[in-house]
């Protein structure tokens, strides 16, 4: 689309907007491009949240969903633009006296891999007549894990054929990614698949809504879309999975690629009316919430691993050389910043696990005490857990309640707590779960180290950095200095950094990160005595990790199959995925 460039302020007056799309809400920030100062912010929850147990939209609202599904409504994403962005601008104006016409660019980031099936013009399929009651017509959120059997088939075939790209993903493709979810869509609802013209990352769909141009971003195309060295898996490979899948890339997926920090287009009149921003300002190429946070945390050099810790954790870092790291989520040339190899790993459940336990595993008396004291149940459990010595609870847990993203890449795995007795209390299990997520991170760090990708600093961003006990446990378990991002809006600030580059305020992401990034170095350091005790606990975690994850014991998969069978129509039998 040809949209006139908006007049652009220069120097200290230039502002940019970053919009971070999370799992449950979107948040917008207004940022001074010169120094990264956040002048206004606002959050807007998605009205339909996450549809996991039943549809909450359309004529079939209330209809149950199978296990491991997670859907969203794309109109909720647009609502963030119409509510959160104007609210952030209003706060910036009221508190700092700035005006919307000082904004020169906008950038967004998204959870990934979150997929939107659309028509040729970008209309989501759930908005078409007759499709609002079809689950496959909705957005498949990153935590939609029902495509695990399809991911298994992709992995098996790739290894049988010796496909060279599989090693760039640690040897395993995730059920969360574009191809597994696309194959599930084809085989479970071929009519919706045939109607779909574009299989679009939400990160790119929202940019499409802003500027009117569809541009695939290099980050998700590389990490989630199996695009390596300029190519996707071949039609021959895809046909071997399913003959109807042969043209998936050419018909549904392939499109122009935009590099991170580039301009995807300019803000349309419609998007300007939604946001209150000037028509014609720069719109940056989309990005992923984790990867965009690295520059915001000042982590643009090799060896600096950033963990964005929230409902899940994504680990990203730069390296100056290409290496094959078993179980990593991917390595992409320029996947985080230009000129370096960007590595990704992750844990599918972290904050979600803590939240699940508080909601479903804590006696009412704890909730009552927390309420009486005016604190959250999380704070009460953390307080009691912090009083314990390492190992005092006698427990070790596996943090697989939402499957394992790295390094096993298997969403058929499930959580486990070992060592419970009649003396076990809620704070004991809570601390064991905190520690389990730290052990999972240590597995990732050691796997990178062993593959020749050194990790020298661990930097935490995201909501969980507010828990000092959890942060100290991570420092002790990993034996690494732990730095923290010095803002509670890491992804949104990261998007703003990319907006500043797309608008030409800064020449590249590294320069913008130096000017706008926020980080406090070595806030937590490992305690040698606690670290030594954690080494012993980690050894037990690693035994369980390998036994259930690698040792051929399929009990977790068999239990999942029984669960699916119980939810299936009468007479159907759920096979154990391989």
Image (spheres, helix red, strand yellow):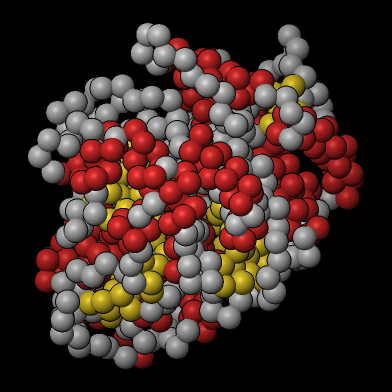
Instruction: Identify which residue is drawn at 81% across, 58% down.
Output: 450
Instruction: Identify which residue is drawn at 36% across, 53% down.
Output: 248
Can you name the residue that lies furthest to the bottom here?
Answer: 10
Q: Nearer the viewer, residue 306 or 90?
A: 306
Asked if residue 104 is positioned above or below residue 236 in the image, the reply reads: below
Asked if residue 78 can be seen in this view, the reply is no
Quadrant into which the C terminus falls: top right
Asked if residue 87 is positioned above or below residue 338 in the image, the reply reads: above
In percent of width and height, residue 136 lies at 29, 37
User: Would residue 87 be found to the left or right of residue 434 on screen?
Assistant: left
Q: Quarter-wise, where is residue 89 in the image? A: bottom left
In percent of width and height, residue 386 lies at 71, 35
In percent of width and height, residue 42 lies at 31, 56
In percent of width and height, residue 276 lies at 17, 67
Instruction: Identify which residue is drawn at 24% across, 45% down.
Output: 194
Asked if residue 407 is positioned above or below residue 337 in the image, the reply reads: above
Q: Nearer the viewer, residue 57 or 551?
A: 551
Quadrant into which the N terminus falls: bottom left
Instruction: Identify which residue is drawn at 45% across, 51% down.
Output: 238
Asked if residue 310 can be seen in this view, the reply is yes
């Amino acid at each position: 689309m040809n949209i006139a460039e908006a007049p652009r302020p220069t120097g200290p007056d230039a502002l940019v907007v970053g919009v971070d799309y999370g799992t449950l809400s979107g948040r917008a920030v207004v940022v001074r491009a010169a120094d990264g100062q956040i002048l206004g912010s606002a959050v807007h929850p998605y009205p339909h949240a996450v549809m996991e147990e039943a549809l909450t939209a359309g004529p079939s609202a209330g209809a149950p969903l199978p296990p491991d599904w997670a859907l969203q409504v794309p109109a909720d994403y647009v609502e963030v633009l119409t509510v959160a962005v104007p609210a952030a601008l209003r706060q910036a104006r009221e508190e700092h006296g700035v005006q919307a016409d000082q904004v020169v660019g906008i950038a967004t980031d998204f959870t990934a891999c979150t997929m939107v099936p659309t028509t040729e013009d970008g209309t989501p399929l759930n908005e078409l007549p007759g499709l609002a009651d079809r689950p496959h017509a909705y957005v498949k959120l990153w935590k939609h894990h029902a495509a695990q059997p399809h991911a298994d088939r992709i992995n098996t075939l790739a290894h049988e054929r010796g496909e060279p790209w599989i090693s760039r993903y640690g040897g395993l493709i995730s059920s969360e990614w574009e191809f597994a979810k696309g194959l599930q869509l084809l085989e479970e609802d071929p009519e919706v698949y045939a109607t779909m013209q574009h299989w679009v990352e939400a990160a790119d769909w929202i940019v499409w809504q802003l500027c009117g141009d569809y541009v695939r971003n290099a980050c998700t195309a590389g990490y989630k879309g199996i695009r390596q060295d300029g190519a996707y898996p071949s039609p021959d490979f895809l046909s071997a999975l399913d003959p109807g899948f042969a043209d998936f890339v050419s018909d549904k997926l392939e499109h122009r690629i935009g590099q991170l920090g580039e301009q995807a287009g300019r803000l349309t009149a419609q998007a300007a009316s939604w946001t209150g921003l000037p028509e014609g300002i720069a719109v940056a190429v989309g990005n992923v919430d984790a990867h965009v946070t690295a520059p915001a945390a000042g982590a643009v050099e090799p060896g600096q691993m950033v963990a964005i810790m929230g409902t899940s954790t994504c680990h990203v870092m730069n390296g100056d050389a290409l290496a094959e790291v078993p179980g990593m989520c991917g390595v992409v040339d320029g996947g985080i910043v230009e000129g370096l190899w960007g590595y990704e790993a992750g844990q599918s459940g972290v904050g979600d696990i803590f939240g699940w336990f508080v909601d479903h595993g804590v006696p009412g008396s704890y909730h009552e005490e927390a309420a009486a004291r005016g604190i959250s149940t999380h704070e009460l459990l953390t307080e009691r857990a912090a009083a314990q010595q390492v190992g005092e609870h006698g427990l070790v847990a596996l943090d697989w309640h939402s499957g394992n993203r790295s390094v096993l890449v298997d969403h058929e795995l499930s959580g486990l707590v070992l060592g419970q007795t009649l003396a076990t209390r809620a704070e004991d299990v809570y601390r064991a779960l905190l520690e389990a997520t730290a052990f999972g991170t240590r597995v990732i760090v050691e796997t990178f180290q062993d593959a020749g990708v050194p990790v020298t600093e661990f930097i935490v961003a995201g909501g969980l950095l507010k828990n000092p006990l959890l942060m100290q446990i991570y420092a002790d378990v990993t034996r690494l200095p732990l730095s923290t991002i010095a803002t509670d809006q890491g992804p949104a600030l990261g998007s703003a950094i990319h907006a500043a580059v797309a608008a030409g305020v800064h020449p590249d992401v590294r320069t913008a990160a130096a000017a706008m990034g926020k980080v406090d170095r070595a806030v937590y350091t490992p305690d040698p005595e606690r670290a030594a005790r954690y080494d012993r606990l980690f050894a037990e975690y690693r035994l369980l990790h390998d036994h259930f994850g690698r040792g051929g014991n399929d009990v977790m998969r068999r239990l999942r199959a029984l669960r699916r069978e119980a939810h299936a129509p009468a007479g159907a039998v759920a096979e154990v995925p391989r």
